[in-house]
Image: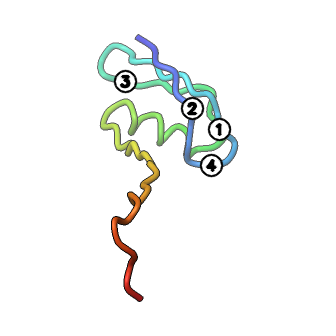
Amino acid sequence: MSQELVCITCPMGCHLTVENLPGGEIQVSGNRCPRGAVYAREETLAPKRVVTATCSHRRPRAVRPLLR
C-alpha cells in the first residue's frame, strides 16, 4: 500500500511517496533532504498534525453607548 504526502518540514515542499513493505518496513521516496524521510515515517506511523481554523467575530451593535 502506498501513500502520498507533501512534506512540511522545510520550504521545498517535496511530494513524498510512502510504501509499506512486508515485515513492517517503510520505504520513502521523493524527499530531497533527510528531514523529509523522517517526516514521512512519523506521519505514517503516528500522525502529529494539528488542524487550525480562524473565524471572524463581530461585536453586535450596542443597545446603549459604551462608557469611556
Q: Front-most of 10 and 23?
A: 10
Q: In the rendered image, which quarter contains the N terminus?
A: top left
Horizontally, is 22 left or right of 55 in the view? left
Percent x, y of residue 62: 37, 65
> Are discs 1 and 2 less than 8 Å apart at CB?
yes
> Are discs 2 and 3 less than 8 Å apart at CB?
no
Q: Residues within 10 Å of mark 3 (few under 14, many from 20)?
A: few
In primary-sequence order, the first of circles 3 and 4 is 4
Q: CA distance from mark 2 to mark 3?
A: 20 Å
Report the residue marked by disc 4.
10
The image quadrant that residue 68 belongs to is bottom left
Report the residue marked by disc 2.
6
Q: CA distance from mark 3 to mark 4?
A: 25 Å
Q: Nearer the viewer, mark 3 or mark 4?
A: 4
Report the residue marked by disc 1.
13
Q: Residues within 10 Å of mark 1 (few under 14, many from 20)?
A: some
Q: CA distance from mark 4 to mark 1?
A: 7 Å
Report the residue marked by disc 3.
25
Q: Nearer the viewer, mark 2 or mark 3?
A: 2
